[in-house]
Image (tube, helix red, strand yellow):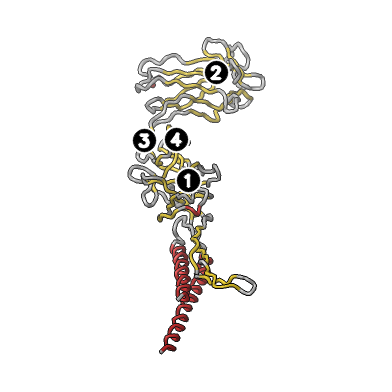
Amino acid sequence: MASFFIPLTGLESDSTALNTIANDLSNMNTTAFKSESTNFADLFYQQIGTTGAGNPITVGAGVKVASNAISFTQGSINSTGNSTDVALNGNGFFVVSNGGGYEYTRAGGFSTDSSGNLVTSNGMSVMGYPAVNGVVNTNAPLAAINIPIGQVLEPRASTSMGMTANLDAAAATPSSFPAQITVYDSLGEPHLVNIQFTQASTTAVPNTWDYSISLPASDYAGAAPAAITGAMTFDTNGNLTSIKQGAGAAQNVGTAAGDISSIPLAFSGLADGSSNLSINWNLLDASGKPTISQEDTASAVSSTTQNGYNSGQYQSFTIGSDGTVTATYSNGQKENVGQLALANVANLQGLQLLGDGDYATTLASGTASVGTSGTDGLATLQDGALEASNVNISDEFSQLIIAQRAFEANAKSVTTFDTVTQDTINMVH
């Protein structure tokens, strides 16, 4: 009898709805879990006649589950303080791999394995763009993000240095002012560059300071070479205008053709056996303005810069809002080791749920487009945080009551039809 099969379709569909709600509630504390809702559709109809007006008379065959729709609304972001945790704020997924293809997840509770690879809770490698010497190449194929745990950052020899300083225009002559900058050789050993500024009474050109550059005698394997000398000339406003190197002619300081922007320094024969030091003393800042001035205030050095460092041991890493993974070393240096890749698809409902917070693309979802945070509508990232489940408890309990009543109604229909059938059989007897 159709009367039995119609409520049975209702019981089956309501069971699916109840299972969906139960799954949502059981995952209310699951990282980045996305809730589902069950949608119904009526089954085909049988036409059993027409009315006097010619309208069809049809009888339905029950109900079916039309879809289980996933809600991809943003979950709240909760701080954890764990550097391996990262939350997505916006659209997209992390790209992960088990070596046999790519999968996608929003669960950013990562950790590192014994090889230093960044992995998900189920051991899948977190994929991204690799970095070479600290420079991320977003045109390169995706690769597993590797954290240099236990590794040592090799020393880097200084190739440039600079200082922001003022020389006292009102200083009595002869007057001398010392300045120092620490640089590093190819072995990571530090050396103190001594720069002596002298405003001598014998200076033939006004507003001119002689300079003398040297390393300590103990830094050399043999006798210390002669100091590197020259002169700096300033205009009446205290701006550095020209440089004279040794016995050479004066050169204008600036960025125009023929101008000088730095002074080359060379130190050879160092006692530790390192390579010769070749350093450019930069005279201009990023905007092209001279960093050394002559004003009527006490001579002083306000800051120094140089690009060398000694070796350093890995200490920690952070993930920036653009997904860049940066390692920090004991020597204070930071180096980019990669950038997390993000992906999105045209039809989110077409994704296949795999468990463990992972999704796979299908023909319905379309191919995933891969990029970086903040591009093509992709999310930004927050380090030391996780996205919470987006399950709404109040809504789930409301839906639970509705599904329960629907199940009870269909069950009552079955028992009612059973009574009718029994009465019919009793009539025969």
Say few, some or many: other residues with alpha carbon within 10 Å of mark 1 (under 14 / 14 to 19 / 20 or more): some
Say few, some or many: other residues with alpha carbon within 10 Å of mark 4 (under 14 / 14 to 19 / 20 or more): few
Alpha carbon separation for disc pair 1 and 3: 40 Å
> Which disc, if any, is residue 198?
2
Task: Say which label, 1 or 2, has the lower sequence index.
Answer: 2
Q: Depth check: 20 or 46 in front?
A: 46
SS state under label 3 = strand
Alpha carbon separation for disc pair 4 and 1: 19 Å
Give the residue type that dot 2 points to: Thr
Say few, some or many: other residues with alpha carbon within 10 Å of mark 2 (under 14 / 14 to 19 / 20 or more): many
> Which disc, if any, is residue 341?
none
Which residue is rendered at x = 47% and y = 68% of the image? 13
SS state under label 1 = loop
Task: Say which label, 4 or 3, has the lower sequence index.
Answer: 4
User: How many numbered marks have been drawn onto this rendered protein structure?
Assistant: 4
Which residue is rendered at x = 55% and y = 18% of the image? 198
Picture coordinates of residue 359 (x, y %)? 44, 52
Task: Say which label, 4 or 1, has the lower sequence index.
Answer: 4
Which residue is label 1 attached to?
A: 367
Task: Say which label, 3 or 2, has the lower sequence index.
Answer: 3
- Mark 3 and mark 2 in contact? Answer it, CB < 8 Å: no
Picture coordinates of residue 99 (x, y %)? 36, 44
User: Closer to the observer: label 4 or label 2?
Assistant: 4
Is 113 positioned to the left or the right of 104 in the image? left
Task: Say which label, 1 or 3, has the lower sequence index.
Answer: 3
Which residue is label 3 attached to?
A: 152
